[in-house]
Image (cartoon, rainbow, N blue to C red):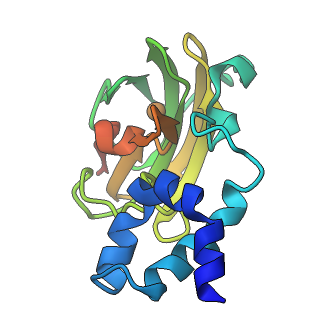
Amino acid sequence: MRTIVRAAFVPFIVFASVAVVGVSAAACGDDDGDGVVEVIGQTPEVEGDPDPEADPDPEADPEALVEITPAPKPADAAQVDVALKEWEIVVSQASVAAGEVYFLVTNEGPDDAHEFVVIRSDLDPGSMPVEDGSVPEDEVDLLAEIEPFPVGSTGSLTLDLEPGNYVLICNIAELEDGEIESHYQEGMHAAFTVE
Ligand SMILES: [Cu+2]
C-alpha cells in the first residue's frame, strides 16, 4: 500500500523536495517511509494545482492586491517610518520610548508585494525559527501585521508597545522558479527596541 501511495505522489515529491528535505532529514536522517508520510501530509496545499510555477500564497500576488492607505497618526504616538524592499527592512529609528508607536510602512519594491509583521522576541532578528521559508506565526509572539500589499503603497500600524525587544519582518514565502523564495531569509528583518 505504501508503495502505491508513494508512486502516485512521485511528481509532488520531486516538486516539494526543497521544502521538505530539511524536515525529513531532521526527523529521520534518511529517506525511508517516514519521510514519505510527511510529504503526503502536505499534499492538500498543492493538490489540484499542477503548475510548478504557481504561487502558493495568492495573497502575495501583486496583481491581486489592492492599494492600502495609512490611518492618521495619533497625536501622542511616536512615528517610525519603515521601508520594505528587496531585500531589507529599513526603519527611521531603531528604538522608541514605550507607549503608542505609529509605524508608517511603505513598500518600495521594486517588484514584490511585501507584508509587515511585528513580533516581540529577544532572538537575533535573523535567527527566528523558519518552516518552509516562513517564520511560523503561531510559534512566536506576533503582535500585529499589515497583510501583503503592493509596491508603491503605504500603510500604517499603531501599537501600544511595552519596553522590550522586537523583530520586524516580512514573512512572505513564494515559489520562484520552483524554489521557495523566503523574504525573511533573503534579509527582510530588522531589530526594534522599545525603551
Ligand atoms: Cu517581502
Image position of 188 with respect to 98: above or below: above
Camera-side residue of 32 and 60: 32
Residue 177 horizontal/vertical position (percent): 45, 31
Residue 144 horizontal/vertical position (percent): 58, 50
Residue 160 horizontal/vertical position (percent): 54, 50
Judge whether residue 117 can be spotted in this image: yes
Instruction: Kindly indicate the quadrant of the structure image that contains residue 84.
Output: top left
Image position of 187 with respect to 79: above or below: below
Camera-side residue of 57 and 157: 57
Q: Is residue 39 left or right of residue 96?
A: right
Image position of 13 with respect to 84: above or below: below
Residue 126 horizontal/vertical position (percent): 24, 51
Report the number of numbered marks: 0
Taking the spot 73% from the left edge, 56% from the top edge, the residue there is 47
Taking the spot 64% from the left edge, 27% from the top edge, the residue there is 61
Judge whether residue 101 can be spotted in this image: no
Camera-side residue of 19 and 14: 14
The quadrant of the image that shows the N terminus is bottom right
Q: Is residue 130 left or right of residue 152?
A: left
Q: Is residue 38 left or right of residue 41?
A: left
Taking the spot 24% from the left edge, 58% from the top edge, the residue there is 127
Instruction: Kindly indicate the quadrant of the structure image that contains residue 123.
Output: bottom left
Camera-side residue of 57 and 1: 1
